[in-house]
Image (spheres, rainbow, N blue to C red):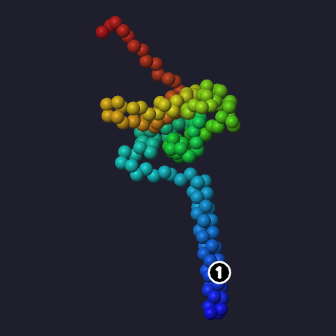
Amino acid sequence: MKKFFEVIKKKWIADTTRLILLVAIIILVYILINVLVGQANLPTFDFTEEKIYSVSDESKELIKDIDQEVTLYFFGADEDTSIIDFAKQYTVINPNIKVEVVNYEERPDLYQKYNVSSAEQAIAVQSPERDTVLSIYELATYDYTTGETIDLKEEKITNAIIETTVAEKPKVYLLKGHE
């Protein structure tokens, strides 16, 4: 009986040691893969039917030939939000477009320059010639007839990029009183 317990102890200790070592290796590999994937700028895949998480072909055509440096400053956003992931798609389309998440403690000068409060969420689009600021509330609207929220982030961001990079803004004149 004594021999039986000794065999069980030795086998149990050996099996437990192997199990702990195997679990530690699996956890280490998992962490390593997450770190490597996080550092790699891999393209995102959008499997939704309407492609709501991807930049449309029309926007790609509009921004692919921009030859100026454009920076999208995100105020009050976290690095892991969907709007940042969406904006990073612009950097893949055109390397002249940069995305930067701004923290109030690190860059209060940008908050002051664009007149954004520390509690506000906004996007500043800056090119060498012009800049514009979008409130986070401008990126969506609500249709009261259908009860749906309409996502406008692609339209607003693309238009802001184009607005800040065009050489000359067109002027529109309206005449009144001449039918």
Q: Look at mark 1 in the image and give the residue it sits on.
A: 13
Q: Residue at x 57, y 28 (%)?
A: 131
Place of residue 18 in the rendered image (x, y in percent of width and height, measured from the top left): 62, 77
Residue 163 showing in the rendered view: yes
| The furthest residue to the top | 177
- Tell me which amino acid carries mark 1: Ile
Q: Is residue 1 left or right of residue 88?
A: right
In the image, what residue occupies the spot 51% across and 33% down?
136
Dot 1, how many residues are within 10 Å of its Cα: few (below 14), some (14-19), or many (20+)? few
- Residue 129 found in image quarter: top right
- Quadrant including the N terminus: bottom right
Q: Pinpoint residue 104: horizontal percent, then vertical percent.
A: 66, 34
Residue at 62%, 31% (x, y): give it: 118
Q: Quadrant of residue 78?
A: top right
Q: Residue drawn 32% across and 7% down?
A: 178
Quadrant housing the C terminus: top left
| Residue 114, image quadrant | top right
Residue 139 image position (x, y, % from top left): 47, 33
For the residue labelled by badge 1, is the local secondary structure a helix, a strand or a loop? helix
Residue 62 visible in the shown view: no
| Residue lying at the far left of the rendered structure | 179
Q: Is residue 53 above or below residue 75?
A: below
Q: Residue 177: x percent and y percent?
A: 34, 6
The one nearer the camera, 34 or 66, is 34
Closer-to-camera residue (159/134): 134
Q: How many numbered marks does the figure carry?
A: 1
User: Which residue occupies the extreme front position in the image?
Assistant: 1
